[in-house]
Amino acid sequence: MNAAIGKTFHIPWENIGLEIRGSAQNVLNHPSFDNPNASIGDPNAGIINSLRVGGRTMQLYGRVSF
């Protein structure tokens, strides 16, 4: 689940705009496990050692326009 929120501010007498935005991927920080090890005869068979999707990442963005 991804999410983003933003706000734009205008300063009319200076004709300047300011945009601030934040976004996040994997907001719930829910792991997505990879397939288990399927090597026959391996003592680690059936063990999951990795994730398909990493942890939560967030980004903050700012822009000034004039």
Image (cartoon, rainbow, N blue to C red):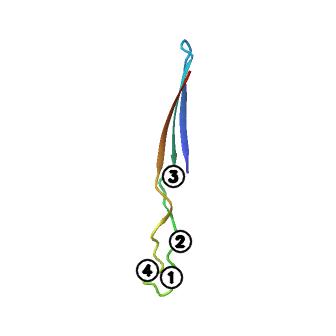
> Could you say where residue 57 lies in the image, as x and y percent from the top left?
47, 49
Q: Residue at x 50, y 82 (%)?
A: 39
Q: Nearer the viewer, mark 3 or mark 4?
A: 4
1 w.r.t. 19: above or below: below
Q: Which mark is residue 31?
A: none
> Could you say where residue 50 lies in the image, as x and y percent from the top left?
47, 67
- Few, some or many residues within 10 Å of mark 1 (<14, 14–19, 20+): few
31 w.r.t. 46: above or below: above
Report helix, strand or loop for mark 3. Answer: loop
Circles 1 and 3 in contact, beta carbons < 8 Å: no
According to the picture, the residue beneath numbered tag 3 turns out to be: 26
- Few, some or many residues within 10 Å of mark 4 (<14, 14–19, 20+): few
Give the amino acid type for the residue marked by disc 4 in the picture: Asn
Report helix, strand or loop for mark 4. Answer: loop
Front in this rendered view, residue 31 or 64: 64
Q: Which mark is residue 44?
A: 4
Kindly report the distance in space between the C-alpha atoms of the residues bearing marks 1 and 3.
31 Å
Q: Residue at x 47, y 81 (%)?
A: 45
Give the amino acid type for the residue marked by disc 3 in the picture: Asn
> Could you say where residue 19 lies in the image, as x and y percent from the top left?
53, 29
Kindly report the distance in space between the C-alpha atoms of the residues bearing marks 2 and 1.
12 Å
According to the picture, the residue beneath numbered tag 2 turns out to be: 35
Give the amino acid type for the residue marked by disc 2 in the picture: Asn
Give the amino acid type for the residue marked by disc 1 in the picture: Ser
Kindly report the distance in space between the C-alpha atoms of the residues bearing marks 2 and 4.
13 Å
According to the picture, the residue beneath numbered tag 1 turns out to be: 39
